[in-house]
Structures are given as C-alpha cells and as structure tokens.
Amino acid sequence: MKQDKILLAHGAGGKLSHDLLKELFLPFLENEILCALDDSAVIPTGRSRLAFTTDSYVVKPLFFPGGDIGRLSICGTVNDLAMAGARPLGISASFILEEGFSTGELERVIFSIKEASMEAGVMVVAGDTKVVEHGAAEGLFITTSGVGIVPEGVDIRGSNAIPGDLVIVNGPIGDHEIGVLLARGEFSLKGEIKSDCAPLSGLVQAMLDTSIDIHVLRDPTRGGIATVLWEIANASKVGIIVEEEKIKVRKEVRGVCDLLGFDPYYLANEGKLVAFVPEGEAKRVLDAMKTEPLGRESVIIGRVVDENPGKVLLKTRIGGHRLLEPLSGEQLPRIC
Amino acid sequence: MNQQKRMDEGDRASIILKEILRLAHGHIRLMEVCGTHTVSIFRSGIRSLLPEGIELISGPGCPVCVTPVGEIDRAIALAQIKDVALLTFGDLMRVPATSSSLNQERAMGRDIRIVTSPLDAVEIAQREAQRRIIFFAVGFETTSPAIAAAVKEARRRGISNLYLLSCQRLIPPAIRVLVSSRDLKIDGFILPGHVSVIIGKSPYSFIAREFSLMGVITGFEALDILEGVYMLLCQKKEGRSDIEVQYRRAVKEEGNQLALEIMEEVFEPVSARWRGLGMIPESGLTLREEFKEMDAALAFDIPYKDKKDPPGCLCGEILQGLKSPPDCPLFDTRCTPEMPVGPCMVSSEGSCAAFHKYGVSR
C-alpha cells in the first residue's frame, strides 16, 4: 500500500523522507553526485572541488529562543557546506512572503541573517523575493543555497567511516527541537530552552587545521543523531557502538522527552555535528574542538567496529544494549 | 553530580542483576501489562541482560492499541461534520481505520488537532465558541481523572460546545479476562505504575486470591523494572502469590482518593469492546446522566459499527500476550511504522513498534 498523498511525516527527515527521495526523486534525477546523499554535493571543477547545497526553511514559529527563521536559514546551509569540509564562498537567499506579513518582522529576520552570516564569515551574494496571496504561505518561507571550496586533501563523506574511527559530538543534543516545541506553546508546556542554532564553519575549520584526516562529518538535524549514525553505518558498511552514558542531554530536554514519549536520539539539532576521526587523531581533534566556543562540550560518544555492518548499537546506562534505528514517521513537523 | 548518579545506576543494576541470576531457575513468564514498561524495557536493553529463562511478554496496556477500528471510524466520521474540530492525542493520528486515518483526514483539510491535555480541549472550546469541539477521549485510569476534571471545568465555565467521544478503558477487568483464559500461560504480572498511582493496590487482589498468580506494581525506570522482576522471582522461590508494590515512591495502597472521586462523579463503568480482547463487562467509562449532553456519540447520532481487524494482522493475539510481534507474517514486511496495518505498530507504546524500533529480537 503506497501513500498517494504527501503527509507531514514525509518532511520529518526519517524513513518516509528517505523513501520519497528513493522512490520519486532519484529515479528521475539520478546521477553520481546526487546519489551520494551527503549534506553538500561536491562537484569537481578542474583542479579544485566545489561544494554546493540548498535548503528550504519553513519553521514554525518564525521566532524562537536562540534564533529565528533568518538565523536558521544561514546556519543550516553554512553547516551543510561545513559538513563537506568546505569553506563557504557565498550564499543566496530566496524569500516567499505572504501578503500581509509585517515589514517590521521581515526586518528582524534580515538583521538576523546579517548577524549569522557575519558569524559564519560568509556573505549573501544573491537573492530573490516573491509574494503570494494571504493563506498561500504561512508568513515567510526562506530558501538558501550555498557554495564553498573544498580544500585540497580534504575528503569527507558519509561513506568514509572505517573500523577504529572514534565518534565525536560537540555537545548536548536535542536543544533545537525542544526549544522550538516549547516556543509553539501548543503542548501547554512552560519553560524556555534555547535552540542551539549556530554556524559550525569555524569549528570545522579548527578541526581541519588540526588534522586533515577527518573521515565523516554530519549535522544531526531532522531525525537526530540516531538517524545520522544509521545513515553513516549504512553508507560506510560498518557497525557503530555508542554509549548512552557519554551522550549529553540537558535535564530540561530529557524532562520534556519523558513527558511526551520522545527519544532524545531522534531530536533535531541545528548547531551540532557528528565527526568520525581515526583513533590516532581523535585526541588532538577533540582538544582543538574544546578550545572553540561551539566545541567546548565536545565528547567522544563511541566507535566504529567491523561487526554488524549497517547497525548502530547503543550501550545503555545499566549495561544492556539496543539498536538505534532511523526515525520512523514524524516526531514533530516544521522544526526547520 | 549527574554523572555520579548515572554511575550509581550502572552499579545498582549489576547488584540487582546478580540477585536475579541467583534466583532464576527454570522458566518463568512475566507479563508487563503497560506499554510504558514495554518501551522502557527495550530502551534500557533489559532483555539483553536477563537470563534466558525469564521471558517478558507485552500485554494490552497501550490505550491506542486496544481502541477498536470502529471507534476510530466513528472519530473520522465526526471530524467530517461541518464546523467540528476533533481533538486527539497524537498517537491516534496514524492508526489505520477502515478506509482512512485521522492523519489522512487532516491532510485532506479536516480540522483535526493534537492535544496533550484534556484541559486544552476546554480552552479551545471557550476560545472557538462558534465551532463544535469533540475530544476523542482515549486512555486508561491514568488519564481519566484529568478528563473528568476537564468535563467539570467545562460545566463550571458554562461551555456548551465541548463533546466527548469516550473510549476510556479500565485495566483490572482486562487483566481478569487475560488470567481467565486457558491459553495464556503466565506466572506473574509486572503491574502498571501510573494506573496504580490512581487506583492503588486492592483492584488487583483477585489476581492472587482467585488465580494464585503474583503481581508487582512497578515503576518505569530501568532499575524499578529490574527490582520488580527480582521481587517476582522472590515470590516464586518462596512459593507465594501476592500483590506487592515496588513503586512505593508514587503508589499508595489505597490509590489517589481525590482522583477516584472525580472519576466516579463524572463517569460510570460500562461494557466496552477492546481490540484483541473483545467485549469486557464494566471495562469502559461513559458520562453519567447529568453530563450526558456532552456525549458526542449521542449528540451527533453517529452509531458505533463493529469492524473486523485487517486480514492477517495479529494485533489481537499480540495484545493478549499469545503471540509475539515477530510471529506475525505482516511484521516488518507489509506492516512497518511508515505503513502500519495494525495499531501495535503505530503507537509509540505498541509492542510491534517497540520490537521494530529497538529491533533486539530480529
């Protein structure tokens, strides 16, 4: 029984999003670069390589603690470039505005875009605006695209993990999704958790300056670290073991998860990365990360193994184990 | 400090596990009635730690899973009425009904909204006085006091556009059906923690008295569950069958009197149909006479029509603990969380979804 209608879950970044891509998009658009399904496409152009990526932002609400749709639209695209190890060159931004949207709010969004791009060290070099009738879009949607240069010698791909690699995450997970959820107020939950929304280009630069031998980088956005680890285990045909005890989750985030039955490993992040680094390089890379503002809470959460290729095993706090599968269905729609 | 606490958790777990290993002889089958236990058991990897002879079986304790197809059909029919907004708990959205699901209906533009608290329904009804608001009330004793409180609050505020489609179910009558069945071979129960916070210990006493089976009311942390298993093993060793409380920090023997009183004031027990278990006397809750005008089933005149479960789906047997999800020919083939056939694959607390998600037994 195939779905004949698009459901919100098709946009959740989990299994259904994957199926949509595999069954509808790839059969028509298939090519070697697209099929890598990495965060950025890497296109060879003569002697250098160009990283290219695009993303649309439909977050609801437009403003939330720790960011807004403008900041998100820069960070998301900068981070996708960074996950290829690329230095960002320029960004384009397209705006779909709903008739009646406040120019004051638009100004706030544009100011955020300016601030975030300065933090990321990149400029918005092209743009477009369209206006649609009232009701045809909810306030404001933004699409950004970005290009960057992949430095020589850098080869970061989801399929590059090898047994012996250690897995590093740069801090506690789940802040973005729970922050946005609380900002919506629809679950009648009080409290404020700040989204972790931040450009990771500086952190990745510091990592690459320490060691060029980084195998995989991914930002665990929709679908969370569980989905990202599963994708890497499959793309690289390796097993991954991570330890629950090492993965940080803020107390407030855990509290909301317990209440709503969410699993923190599936929560979206917008300022986190998962790095796969050879064991011999891991300590130096970790130390370098810890000197960066966005890497202070970095920690090694696990390792890559030969056994169980395509599977991610979580060692639980009481010493048991379970599999981390990719996100199924939707956890929460429109979080980015 | 947090790190310290977690290290303790690992140490304490290994102490209890040692005791469990010492006591575990031969085969013992324990049923965790509640879906929250099922999820916690998988999440913490308890199955991977217990000796082989201890078999944990999931029971009928997921409210979404035991809601019959016919009731979801009825909710969909209500949502199709003009000016109606249907409010529901999120897990019900994806359960396949006869020809659609609440999710698909929402995609087609019906006003179907997810709430997390029955009191949200009161707020929405007050704010949107021109719409008729129907709350799809699904849940066990854990949720019923809050639903009763919402009904009373709506009455207090003079709200007249709020209705209830009540599919609330009670746990002890369902356990009675399970233990009366000859097919089910169970040695004891890991009894639900949250439900017992409300109802206390005595509603389960028949399990020990009439059927000589043991039960331990257990909390939801991994350590609680390990201790619950340990307490059941102790009973077995000593040849006792009692109802005991492990979850002492939350459960009082007599339950929560205030909650029980408000439930009693607003609802009365009726015979109710459970998916998998069929009709069970006095196992559902309906609005009492003085609140009947809020009963959506009466106000909108949409009768309940019994529907068969989808062909091949073993949810019924799985809910009774007679079959395990991997026994079902549809499990992980035609029935997955993306394209669920039965409710046990939909609900986050359903056994099939838990087996699929945590994939330990495959």
Image (cartoon, coloured by chain):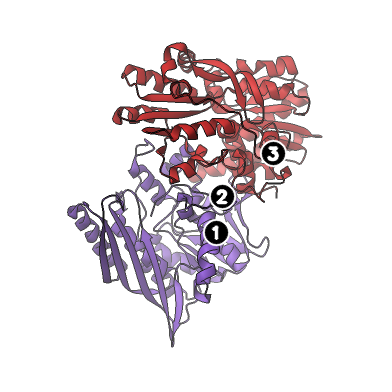
Chain colours: A purple, B red
Residue A123: image location, x then y, percent: 27, 71
The disc label shown at residue B338, or none: 2
Q: Nearer the viewer, residue A228 or B114?
A: B114
- The total number of labels drawn is 3
Separation (CA) of disc 1 from disc 2: 10 Å
- Residue under the point 31% across and 19% down: B157
Amino acid at the residue labelled 2: Glu
Q: Is residue B334 visible?
A: yes
Instruction: Say whether residue B205 is left or right of residue A141.
Output: right
Task: Quickly name the residue at label 3.
Answer: B314
Nearest the viewer among B284 and B241 is B284
Q: Which residue is mark 1?
A: A19
Q: Report the amino acid beneath label 1.
A: Asp
Where disc 2 sits, the SS reads loop
Q: CA distance from mark 3 to mark 2?
A: 18 Å
Q: Residue at x 59, y 68 (%)?
A: A236
Residue located farthest toward the right when viewing the structure as drawn: B26
- Residues indicated by labels 1 and 3 sit on the same polypeptide chain: no
| Residue type, numbered disc 3 | Leu
* CB atoms of marks 1 and 3 within 8 Å: no
* Relative image position of residue B196 (x, y in whole percent): 56, 23
Height in image: B134 above or below A64?
A: above
**Mark 2 chain:** B
Do callouts 1 and 2 mark residues in contact (Cβ within 8 Å)? Answer: yes
Where residue A151 sits in the image (x, y, percent)?
Answer: 42, 80
Residue B333, position in %: x, y? 67, 51
Subunit under mark 3? B
Mark 1 falls on what kind of element?
A: helix
**Callout 2: 10 Å neighbours few (<14), some, many (20+)?**
many
